[in-house]
Image: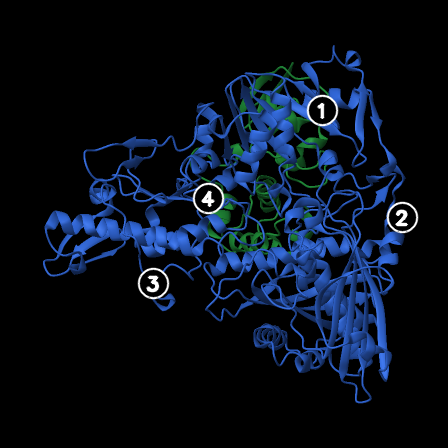
Chain colours: A green, B blue
Amino acid sequence: MANLTINGKTLTLDVEPDTPLLWAIRENAGLTGTKYGCGIAQCGACTVHIDGVAMRSCGISVSEAEGKKITTIEGLASGDMLHKVQEAWIAQDVPQCGYCQSGMIMAVAALLNEKPKPTDADIDEAITNICRCGTFQQVREAIHTIASA
Amino acid sequence: MNKHISPRLNRRAFVIGTAAVGAGLAIGLDLPFGGPAVVRAADGSPEIGAWIVVRPDETVVIRIARSEMGQGSLTGLAQLVAEELECDWTKVTTEYPTPGQSVARKRVWGDFSTGGSRGIRSSQDYVRKGGATARVMLIQAAADAWKVPASECTAANSVITHTPSGRTTTYGKIAEAAARLTPPADVKLKDPKDWKLIGKGVKRLDTVDKTTGTMVYGIDVKLPGMLNAAIKDCPVFGGKLKSFDEAKIADMKGVKKVVKVGDTAVAVVADTWWHAKTALEALPIVWDEGDNAKVSSESIAKWLAEGLNDSQPAYVGNKNGDAKAAIAGAAKKVEAVYSYPYQNHATMEPMNATALYTADKCEVWCGTQNGEAAFAAVLEASGLPAEKCDVHKVMLGGGFGRRGQTDYVRQAVMIAKQMPGTPIKLLWSREEDMAHGKYHPITQCKMTGAFDANNNLIALHYRLSGQSILFSLRPEALQNGMDPAAFQGVAQSGEAAFGYSVPNLLIEHAMRNPHVPPGFWRGVNVNHNAIYMECFMDELAQAAGQDPLEFRRKLMGNHPKHLAVLNAVAEKIGWNTPAPQGVYRGIAQVMGYGSYVAGAAEISVTDGSKIKVHRIVASTDPGYVVNPAQVERQVAGSFVYGLSALFYGGCTVKDGRIEQTNFDTYNSMRINEMPKVETVMVPSGGFWGGVGEPTIGVAAPAVLNAYFAATGKRIRSVPLRDQNITFA
């Protein structure tokens, strides 16, 4: 059993402490917006915010995440008001297959939280998610659009 | 911040989440007295022909048979239908018919297969006719109601107007009456110059759910009572499962069952996938690896190299004059050997499928590029007839050709069949996905070019040695043993024709099929053929002491469309003006999938091993452009996929199995490595070419040719990481 605070709600989940947070989120909490891509913290598809910091949830155990504030893609919007990154993604038609985009959006949201006006170099350093469709051009443009708004 | 925009893609998530069985269109039939039957969608709204349902609230549902995997065809196909239908685009939503329904209706939606960049080009004619047919029926119904000739009525934006009287009605109001009319036998399609929606970069119809985490991919499917399966197939292709000791994991948490899957694999079924995977890793398994365990990359390379020798048999794919004689008597000749490795598709979403088997029904939910092939796999694996099976398609987390194969669908059914009544979601780990791909085929190529005394290219011998995809996956498509697709990009004619005229030409393929299963990997045979030919063209230009662009141009007089895209990139990148200090250019062109494409790159190189790609320019002539915004994304994405393969890809074989296991050993480009791609669209009209794949062919040779310009060194094998060359 573990208590996890996900998107503002504290859930008591029947999950072993060494389970990767990713699978607790997907299978125990039932929030499937966070994606499995590699399981070794390489691709970033499973990126969530832990106490506001973008982290790869496949590389964090449930016990490490207990007591922390976890935000998934489902919790990024405020009620029915989308987050500015989601809005920009829709406005600029960023996703292709979309599978990596939950993680991409979470990574970008964390970057903008830290640096509201990131340079290209800031983007290059902070956004290390894999996108096999190759949406990088739209990702970069959308970030700059948000920053200049 | 704006209000949450309601997505317009039909909410299959809801359907899947709430209704376990029989989700989909749930088509009903009216059988009125006289007149044709009215076919109804699940909500009771009438079909106006098989492609369109119009709801009373004016929503227009367009049926899409091909699969959306990011390439944008779902939106493009809807544009094609809506153009002829003259409906209000803001009211358009889409829906996938199931393969089972299609078969039951004599394949009314045609081919479901979504590969070979065919999604738009192979269906454009009949889907536009579907739209036009519905428009004619809707107008006729309004004219009948008004008792006026249909010729006096027009339709636009879902509104029908009787021009003389100014009376109007809407599609939603007249749909019931229209559905009762006999469809016209023949309809006239618009002249392309009259298109309003085709050619417009309208927004995709499937974006919102992809930004909120609500889009349902195969991995996200949930059914009541569902269990999860993790699988391990014999790591040596062709090997078998000998034994496993399930007692060792029987007590592990969540484990429900351990099952044999065919002759080659074992799966653990558990309450959660994490439990299934953890138990599978602890399961002692003995494999019968067989003789293939002796095969390595080295042994494959040696075997392929032997095929480059003229003494070995080869299939001739393109020939004119007498290349061998011309080379023998030439004033100068140039020779080079290139190679291209196996590549894994590495879709972001690993393979998965969910199956529910009962004694009289088998249903599967999965992402697939070919609904009908998946359906056939369900029939075969379940042993049930077509009317008792179906496949429910969901969004693909990447396809790139991998999800045109049905191995994962078959496995899911084989597992579910051993647990009747329990839905089973089979998910491959990334490691399983890396180990059991359908890999880009492996080849080598020896090229010999010959010049006369005036440095004119008089002969070219292009000898390919290596794997045939069709031999493995579609042997019925071989022509007297020859794989015609092996010549993609260097073929005599057709949709992937060679773009140069050489007086003496011999292009041949010594087919050698190692045991590693090949597949259609985005761009397919265009990838290596374009690298070989376009890099060697640069070598020939160098040998002739000529500019690579000018050298090509001289050979392209009879290939104006190839030349036009090449000229377009040359102009855009400024080929005739000097590049910035320290920056070098490369150029390439190829034809594939019915489209003409070219690319040019500007790079700088540090220490001979650190490449910075500053700029990429690409041009494409696909005949017609349906959605320029999506074409732009496909072109840019092709460079990411193609350059990832060039720099980081390459799957190697040791002890009969693939060595790469995950993205740490099979990496992919990140945003910091990718420059902006400047896309130049030069649609010349009159034909329909594909977009998703052809451009990938020019990505690698444009960069490799620029690398030569920068360093004077030729790179003749992929990936660059093997040569300690990487991104700066």
Looking at the rendering, in which quadrant would you find the N terminus of chain B? Answer: top left
Same chain, marks 4 and 3? yes
Q: Which residue is mark 4?
A: B65
Q: Is residue B80 visible?
A: yes
- Where does the image place residue B77, in percent across and percent down from the top left? 44, 51
Amino acid on which the number 1 mark rests in the picture = Lys
**Image position of B149 (left or right of B575):** left
- The residue under label 1 is B277
**Residue occupied by mark 2:** B299
Q: Quadrant of residue B578?
A: bottom right
- Looking at marks 4 and 1 on the same chain, the residue that comes earlier in the sequence is marked by 4
From the image, tell me which residue sits under label 3.
Answer: B190
Of pointers 3 and 2, the one earlier in the residue sequence: 3
Q: Position of residue A53 (x, y in %)?
A: 64, 37
Q: Earlier in the sequence, mark 1 or mark 3?
A: 3
Instruction: Say which chain tag 3 marks.
Output: B
Which is more N-terminal, label 3 or label 4?
4
